[in-house]
Amino acid sequence: MTTYDIALIGFGGVNRTLAELVATRGDELSRELGFGLRVVAITDLRLGSLVRDGGIDMDMALRINPADETFAAHGGSADPDNERVIRTCAADIICEATFTNPATGEPAASHVRWALEAGKSVCTTNKGPVALHGAELTGLAQRNGLHFEFEGAVMSGTPVIRFARQLFPGLNLNGFEGILNGTSNYVLGRMEEGLGFEESVREAQQRGYAEADPTADIDGHDVQLKVLIMANELLGAGLRLADVQRQGISALTPGDLSRAKNEGRRWKLVGSARRNPDGTVSASVAPAALPLDHGLAGVSRANNAVSFNTDLLGPVTVSGPGAGRVETAYALLSDIIAMHGARNQVAADA
Amino acid sequence: MTTYDIALIGFGGVNRTLAELVATRGDELSRELGFGLRVVAITDLRLGSLVRDGGIDMDMALRINPADETFAAHGGSADPDNERVIRTCAADIICEATFTNPATGEPAASHVRWALEAGKSVCTTNKGPVALHGAELTGLAQRNGLHFEFEGAVMSGTPVIRFARQLFPGLNLNGFEGILNGTSNYVLGRMEEGLGFEESVREAQQRGYAEADPTADIDGHDVQLKVLIMANELLGAGLRLADVQRQGISALTPGDLSRAKNEGRRWKLVGSARRNPDGTVSASVAPAALPLDHGLAGVSRANNAVSFNTDLLGPVTVSGPGAGRVETAYALLSDIIAMHGARNQVAADA
């Protein structure tokens, strides 16, 4: 059976959960999927780096508390040294899940680039590299015969990119509309129930949906990146970030929401893109008062959804979690599974 | 390029639309999909049968009006002669879309069986053969190295079976809940808006959602078959029809619906199955007053949806059309595309 050696870049919640999945369900997964996984390198801002060509003892790695020690106490280094590890370790696949600045895509974009230059396939949960450097990185992967997968960058483990790519063969995809940010959706839902804006944001933070600084969620920056990814990857739009019009929800008042409710409508922050008659693609993020029978109006709490507009089926919608540690770790696993499937497909076409 | 020869069994709305798709978009589809399609046989209760090993002139076939003439006037026969055509024609794939009795699965089940016995793969849009004879027919296909596909039997072209089979690798599927009948969902929606039961059913009939005899929709028989298909095919339940508890919507009153509305709930006819701790599967069809933040509460009008309960992602929902001529014809096309993909996969594994 094939075993893929993987490197975990960033050992926070997501890659740690992936490591736990491999440790606890590895045998079950191997039987189902036909391949095994072995972690041969880990880097982390706080823990440093550890490289073991023969496989890292995952019980040990998962037990380390970054508050107490680093990998230096376990034969590694206190220095994450991402570039050297990514370029030189024995991994077939780099699992990239670092804390990354969404405005620049760094350091994730460099991690992806180094990996692809060094002949390693990459899966990432970071939006930045895909949204801001998608064409460059996808091209680099293709030229080098490698895979660059990023399902987790849009709706965590809910398979929306793969849904549109794999399950619409023979259909024309004319656009999409999505609810792509759980925090803003939660806030709008609570405001509709009468809570004020500030209070709703605070509640979202208490429940762990919103970051300490909720600006990216509330002002639509997070959705803008996700729309850009889907517009470029699924519609071949060739857009840049500034091409995606962006408006957040902070101008909406509880009065707006209750008025809409009385009219049988519901405000949602909608990220959308559509193919124009001339072939170009227009994309935007903006609040919209949807009629209650709209496919996205019923997406409540922190859930996410994307409605794909197809020629033969009309709108087809996928909804599910848009965030979460386990959900996002599963996205990386699903990316690796997709690479394995594509490898078999290439063997078939040869 | 591979060309698949296909036979259209039943030349009503669905297969006629498939023929139109092949005729008008065949070249575009070939470029995208890497294979061509050629219709070499058609049978129909009213039109009779026509077999042409070199390919049928589809313009001619689509122009024939069954009120005026049969295939006998075009070198064929007024007798559909399904068994002979299915067993002896040159088709690689049988596209089965006849008017079939859902209680017995006939004549579709026989059509599928004859095809698989004769070495031909089959796609069907009929629920009966899959729900009532799924294990037998799937086993027959496997033993003969053939494909038996039936995406259109559950939600027309909305890919729910393929979604669960292809996009949840590495996940455990513990059950599902679905809104699987557009007529009953439309009727419940109109009753919530204050219309009476009879009036709502009449309106559904006028809009073309409900059959002249809406019993199968209203009493849950239609949903029962779809639940049985998904429980057996996706959960390996091994259930028979009588194992799926069934209750329809005819006992619900407008008062029930408005009372639920005031309590923030909405009545839906829900088909569901869940895996029990002992590994068995329980399945049922019954009305349920769902809270408005339930993933299925927002599925309105004649739309359908299935919410899959997974271990790592929680509920993931697909919604879209559950009926329609074009939508169901696309289901057959998607089945053929899946067969082509599987053929390549087999070549890879060899």
Image (tube, coloured by chain):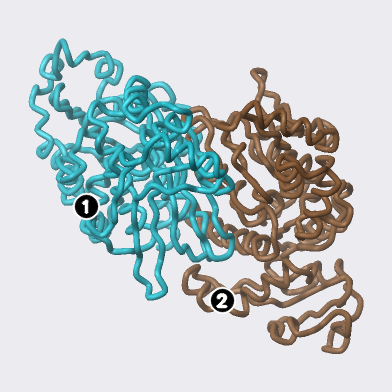
Chain colours: A cyan, B brown
Rendered view: B291 above or below B73 = above
The chain ID associated with circle 2 is B
Question: Residue A135 in the image: x percent, y percent?
Answer: 25, 59
Residue positioned 81% across, 67% down in the render: B87
Q: Secondary structure at mark 1?
A: helix
Near-viewer residue (B293 or A82): B293
Question: Residue B180 in the image: x percent, y percent?
Answer: 70, 44
Residue positioned 23% across, 55% down in the render: A241
The chain ID associated with circle 1 is A
At label 1, the amino acid type is Leu
Return the residue at label 2. B25
Q: Is residue B82 left or right of residue A101?
A: right
Residue positioned 60% across, 47% down in the render: B160
Return the residue at label 1. A132
Separation of marks 2 and 1 at Cα, in angstroms: 35 Å
Graded by Cα atoms within 10 Å as few (under 14), some (14 to 19) or many (20 or more), the crowding at tag 2 reads few
Rendered view: B33 above or below A97 = below
Rendered view: B245 above or below B117 = above
Q: Is residue A144 left or right of residue B50?
A: left
Q: Is residue B296 left or right of residue A24?
A: right
Near-viewer residue (A136 or B49): A136
Q: Secondary structure at mark 2?
A: helix
